[in-house]
Image: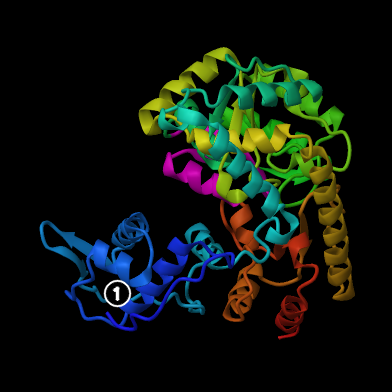
Amino acid sequence: MHNTEWRPARGQGQRVSEQVLTRLQSEIAQLRSGARLPSVRSLAKRWHISTHTVVTVYERLMAQGLIESRPYSGFYVRARTERREPEMPLQLAHSGRVDTQWMLAAFMGQNEGAGVPKNWLDHERVLSAVRHVGRNAGSGLLDYGHSHGYAPLRRHIATQLDQAGIHAHPDRQLLLCSGVTHALDLILRHSVKPGDCVLVEEPAWYLVFARLALGGVKVVGVPRLADGPDMRKMEQLVQTHRPVLMIINSVVHNPTGSSLSLAKAHQLLQLAERYDFFFIEDDTFSELHPGSAYRLAQLDQLQRVILVGGYSKVLAAGLRTAYVAANPECIEALVRLKMLSGMTTPELTERVVHRLLSEGQQRRFVQRMRYLAAEGLEQTLDRLAALGLQPDFKPIGGMFAWVNVGCDSESIVKRLHTERHTLVSGNLFFPDQAPTAYLRFSAALADKPMFWEAFRRCLES
């Protein structure tokens, strides 16, 4: 190694160990594989730093795979492995199929139109909660955690549900999961078998259809209207197919933005009682509803309804924390399945979520999110109206509008993708994935003029 005159600067903000690490990373990049590094003592003497600092930095360099330790010999530059990152094609061939797997891969690279924009979330508040948990959790993070999930968070959720008129015992009727998708997966694995019929709304969240297809389930769609499912059509389908359950998104429906009426909620529960099936009620976007809303779980009190909710949309997607509220027998079965398939869920993230929900700022933050979503959605609808497009019924709240664009939505999605704009193809929101002219538009698109210009060109071509 060269340039022995370098010294770390002291008292200028950056820690000495960080300066030493950065310096060594730079110098190692210039050395050949197998080159020997100075001993701990000689480097400490050369740069006037402690041997403890050198040892700490060398350990970090080993963890990064840049150097290696050879017993009784010293530290050496580790042999470099050339890695070629696979190129992700930005352009989809026109003969390619826009399916669920394609959409998931597309959204991994960009989030435009996928959900809540990052700049709406409170990055600093999440980081503060992470730091607080790290300082105060003690040895609790070294354990597996409780099979049902972090108990204080379950108690907090039980209190929130009680305020919404849904009574769930925190120990016997609540289970924490790694996101809503994980919760639905556990419920479906427990509740349905190949050949069973499951009713879904159409349109509806497209990942549900992909998950049901994995289980060999017969999926039957019920048209969604402005106040809930089309009850006349649904009763005909129930009589014909005798479903074991229905998956429903009652409040701020994805993708239409509609919400269930009280009259429809009563009719649904009466139908379920008459034909003996139950509901999975997806409550994912309910916090973005502008006022009071009706849920099946409020009327049923978790007898025929399994309620699923989460916090990815209003806290941070990476926290992956959700809950299932159900009757005690169902929760007991889901706990067994959860433990057999993946053991406990990470208590670290559950503690962070609990901190965020209980520190007193969440109510004000959710109000801000509702305002941003409402404002963004109104601007998106204005943009669409300027192009002569409008939804069949105006969304009550949430992030999305469901609009007929007058031509095959899949062809538009393909053309937009070539210009780095990603929308979910409308056909994916239907169980049979037949071609459709409908597309889901997000409030997150409101302030993206490049998207709207590209979309206009697609409509005119």
Give the vertical position of 91 relative to 167 (above or below): below
| Closest to the observer, 70 or 429 | 70
Tell me the SS state at disc 1. Answer: loop
Q: Where is residue 355 in the image (x, y as percent from the top left)?
A: 66, 35
Q: Quarter holding the C terminus?
A: bottom right
Please determine whether, in this image, residue 442 is positioned above or below residue 38. above
Rendering quarter of residue 139 = top left
Relative to the observer, which residue lies in front, 4 or 392? 4
Residue 117, compared with residue 3, is above or below; it is above
Residue 351 picture location, percent across and down: 58, 33
Question: Mark 1 — residue?
Answer: 83
- Residue 405 position within the rendered picture, expressed as x and y whole percent measured from the top left: 76, 69
In the image, 110 versus 30, the foreground residue is 30
Residue 181 image point, x, y percent: 54, 42
Question: What amino acid is found at the position of numbered circle 1 in the picture?
Answer: Arg
User: Pointer 1: residues within 10 angstroms few (<14), some, or many (20+)?
Assistant: few
The image quarter containing residue 116 is bottom right
Instruction: Name the quadrant of the N terminus.
Output: bottom left
Question: Residue shown at 56%/49% (left/top)?
Answer: 318
Residue closer to the observer: 239 or 223? 223
Q: Identify the magenta region.
A: 195-219
User: How does the figure colour the protein chain or chains?
Assistant: rainbow
Q: Is residue 116 above or below residue 111?
A: above
**Which of the 4 image quarters holds residue 170?**
top right
Residue 231 shown in magenta: no
Q: Is residue 229 visible?
A: no
Residue at image point 32% right, 65% down: 44
Q: Which residue is drawn at 65% across and 20% down?
A: 304
Horizontal relation, residue 215 to residue 118: left or right: left
On the question of residue 85 being in view, the answer is yes
Name the residue: 42% across, 21% down. Answer: 336
Left or right position of 249 against 340? right
